[in-house]
Amino acid sequence: MSIHPYRTVDVFTAEPLRGNPLAVVFDAEGLSDAQMQAIARWINLSETTFLLPPTDAQADYRVRIFTPGGELPFAGHPTLGTCHAWLEAGGQPQRQGEVVQQCGVGLVRIRREAARLAFAAPPMRASEVSPAMQRQVLAALGLQPDQVQAVQMLDNGPRWLSLLLDSAQTVLSLQPDHRALAGLAKVGVIGAHAPGGDAQFEVRGFVSHAGVPEDPVTGSLNAALAQWLIAHGRAPRRYVAAQGTCLGRAGRVFIEADEAGVWVGGDTVSCIAGELRV
């Protein structure tokens, strides 16, 4: 039996139980791939991360990210939550004000600003979505074509079939057929709120094929959406996105574009600390 320090961190919220929880397992170098997958399946959160020594001298730590159904090369809320747990446990970055994470997509920079962390959005590739797939996804979401303003496939490690909808209300009203979506793609939707609230956009991420019907708050999706929409003038260079509303959460994702790229930030808070024995 091996014993590993363990934390559960709530991400994209400063209030416990209102964001997206992440399981973080420390000292994971003795665990096999099969054990990591079994742990992630047993914990059954959208992601579980495993902290390892870096193999790149520029990195402060290395992380592997597992869903209950498989490993991911990158994900946003695990990036912020793992960094939070690593710092809280006494991790010391090589550079003042910045942490460098090594993961499946390479090195990811994480900025420390007061109590909030923000990661640099990794490179994103956009491609067209075939008309046939668009029709299938719209049918699974119960959308009419005139409710959709733009569609793109966005790939920053995870691949997101992404739709800009006509309003936040349309986003919130969706009742997707998850069984139909499971055979298609991960789907992200975003729509603008009316002015005056604390969030400018509403986001939802449907990940039916990963064993989790809807992700509460999704960093990788928000990163890709921000890069896409800002580049095409459909979103300002700085905004707040709400996510998780339909799941009883209150996630807030803070987007900022500068000369270095797009930064995706959020508050983080530890909820559980203990030991994992396997």
Image (spheres, rainbow, N blue to C red):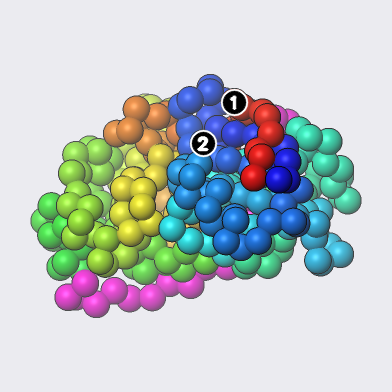
Give how far across and how far down residue 190 sits, in percent.
33, 49
Q: Compared to 24, does 245 lie above or below?
A: above
Q: Marks 1 and 2: CB-CB under 8 Å?
A: yes
Amino acid type, label 1 = Cys
Q: Kindly identify which residue carries mark 1.
A: 271
- Specify whether 230 is left or right of 150: right
Q: State yes or no: residue 256 in magenta.
A: no
Q: Residue at x 19, y 60 (%)?
A: 180
In the image, residue 24 lies at what x, y percent? 63, 42
Quarter of the image with the C terminus in it: top right
* Residue at the far top in the pictured view: 15
Q: CA distance from mark 1 to mark 2?
A: 9 Å
Residue 264 visible, this angle:
no
Determine which of the numbered discs, if any, sits on residue 21 in the image. Answer: 2
Closer to us: 184 or 160: 184
Q: What residue is drawn where x is 33% and y is 76%?
A: 128
Where is residue 60 shown, x and y percent of the image? 81, 53
Q: Nearer the viewer, residue 195 or 152?
A: 152
Residue at (53, 53) in percent of width and height: 38
Using the rendered view, name the quadrant where residue 14 is placed.
top right
2 relative to 151, above or below: above
Q: Is residue 29 above or below residue 218?
A: below
Residue range (magenta): 113-133
Q: How many marks?
A: 2
- Residue found at x 59% / y 25%: 271
